[in-house]
């Protein structure tokens, strides 16, 4: 699964995911790389929100850390 969006002069790569049994085979890296090549103008900056498990993919695609994002959960009572 993958979402690529261009808005306000920035390309956003979102919802990059693979099913557990297909992980660690290069599928997500290949999919994201091809999507960026095909649909993201090389002159626009791109952003990717990566989980700790996906930082390797982000780095292989050429992204570097630019900040930190905190996650919070709300559990129904």
Image (cartoon, rainbow, N blue to C red):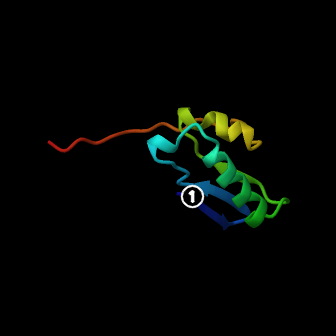
Q: Identify the residue shown where x is 54% and y is 33%.
A: 53
Tell me if 37 is positioned left or right of 70 in this view. Answer: right
Q: Position of residue 8 (x, y in %)?
A: 69, 66
Tell me if 29 is positioned left or right of 41 in this view. Answer: left
18 up-or-down from 40: above or below? above
Q: Which residue is mark 1?
A: 2
The quadrant holding residue 71 is top left
Q: Position of residue 30 (x, y in %)?
A: 69, 50
59 up-or-down from 9: above or below? above
Q: Identify the residue shown where x is 58% and y is 45%.
A: 49
Spot the residue most to the left: 77
Q: Identify the residue shown where x is 85% and y is 60%.
A: 43
> Is the residue marked by circle 1 packed among few (<14), some (14-19), or many (20+) residues within 10 Å?
few
54 and 9: which is toward the camera? 54
Q: Position of residue 69 (x, y in %)?
A: 53, 38
Q: How many marks?
A: 1
In terms of secondary structure, where does tag 1 sit? Answer: loop
56 and 46: which is toward the camera? 56
42 up-or-down from 70: above or below? below
Q: Position of residue 47 (x, y in %)?
A: 67, 50
56 up-or-down from 7: above or below? above
Tell me if 63 is positioned left or right of 71 in this view. Answer: right
Q: Identify the residue shown where x is 51% and y is 48%.
A: 18
Q: Quadrant of the C terminus?
A: top left
């Amino acid at each position: 699964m993958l979402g690529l969006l261009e808005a306000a002069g920035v390309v956003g790569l979102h919802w990059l995911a693979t099913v557990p049994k297909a992980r660690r085979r290069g599928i997500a890296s290949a999919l994201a790389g091809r999507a960026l090549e095909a649909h993201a103008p090389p002159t626009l900056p791109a952003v990717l929100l990566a989980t700790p498990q996906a930082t390797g993919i982000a780095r292989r695609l050429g992204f570097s850390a630019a900040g930190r994002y905190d996650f919070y959960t709300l559990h129904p009572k």
